[in-house]
Image: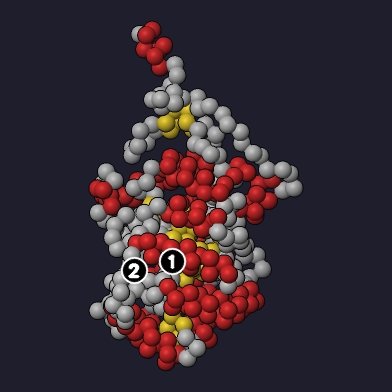
Amino acid sequence: MQFGIFSVSDITRDPVSGETPSEAQRIKAAVAIAKKTEEVGMDVFAIGEHHNPPFFSSAPTTLLASIAAQTERIVLSTSTTLITTNDPVRLAEEYAMLQHLSDGRMDLMLGRGNTAPVYPWFGKDIRESLPMALENYNLLHRLWREDVVDWQGRYRTPLQGFTSTPRPLDDVPPFVWHGSIRTPEIAEQAAYYGDGFFANNIFWPKEHYMRLIRMYRQRFEHYGHGTAAQAIVGLGGQAYIAKRSQDAVREFRPYFDNAPVYGNGPTMEDFTRQTPLSVGSPQEVIDKTLTFRESFGDYQRQMFLMDHAGLPLTTVLDQIELLGSEVVPVLRRELAARRAPDVPDAPTHASLVRAKYGDAEPRQPRPNANRGDNVTGGSPYQDTEDARR
């Protein structure tokens, strides 16, 4: 079972101090948060992708590469990488490069995001978002597994004899999670490829996410990747922790009440009853998180959102310390004791290499020129063929 921190990268005014951090401060804070996540013994740090204020993470691979250089063990991921408005060729290149730089300590979560204007900003039509997501991932999947790709689709120019570089580390593609909060077709996509499915499990009651996860598990089994119980599931969650429950409620209330995503809505008490948000003592956070398994079955990755709503960096680092020292060790022990014996761990680069090669040495691809024309992307024989006509 993996535990970690994920960030949406918001830049929000602190309602207590009245201060709003700069972009530079928040970017540096994200690095500090990732390093703290590793320091306290957790397994994963993930950052979202946004291209509009008040968010800063428009280039997640750049940020994660910097973090990779400053850490040793933690897995670096995304929450989410936009499969619709990014060119799948660039995704193949950038995340393979990150895979090499991190020595395989990475994976990624793909999704469509929740910002409608991003589509026209990148020349895309939001009405085509779902078929675009399906087609783009089909191409990305092939680019990481085939040394030379010929491809034609609806949403980008054709590829003829194209080789994406660098090739994946050890010729093993990064593991992919598909994130969705509402779309059964994305759960179907994750199941079809045998990939992971991540439900952010933040804003809505558990029943909403249960339907998607149940469908994903059933279809994972249908496509022959294993039993429904062996499907690879990740969950999000939010927490604010203090030694005493009443202190947690008092300290977090102004941040909850003024948060852009749920401020001026339900009361904090109603929200914690109706959603996975936990505000309380370490034991209360443990007890609530353990209910996730009762609702969703055994799963492989639990992520927590903690650096949002204007919380200052010092507070976030204290929260991660409490989470890593007093909450996660108990959750590891309890969830391991309850897990069915045939449920797999979350895939890692090392486990994927073992699955592919066993005890043999992994293949290390060498540079190989594209069959196509590197200037136009077309066939090198096209001019000759045209001349013959």
- In this rendering, is residue 28 above or below 51? below
Q: Residues within 10 Å of mark 2 (few under 14, many from 20)?
A: some
Counting from the top left corner in percent of width and height, residue 187 is at: 43, 57
Query: Looking at the image, do the residues carrying marks 2 and 1 touch, with CB atoms under 8 Å apart?
Result: yes
Q: Quadrant of the N terminus?
A: bottom right
Residue farthest to the top, as pictured: 388
Res 139 → quadrant: top left
Q: Secondary structure at mark 2?
A: loop
Disc sitting over residue 29 in the figure:
1
- Residue at 41% over, 11% down: 384
Q: Mark 2 belongs to which amino acid?
A: Pro
Left or right of 97 on screen, residue 263: left
- In this rendering, is residue 269 above or below 227? below
- Residue at 38% over, 57% down: 57
Counting from the top left corner in percent of width and height, residue 168 is at: 56, 43
Is residue 127 shown to the viewer in this render? yes
Q: Which residue is mark 2?
A: 21
Q: Quadrant of the C terminus?
A: top left
- In this rendering, is residue 129 above or below 71? above
Res 240 → quadrant: bottom left
Q: Mark 1 belongs to which amino acid?
A: Ala
- Residue at 44% over, 16% down: 381
Disc sitting over residue 276 in the figure:
none
Nearest the eye: 44 or 378: 44
Left or right of 151 on screen, residue 43: right
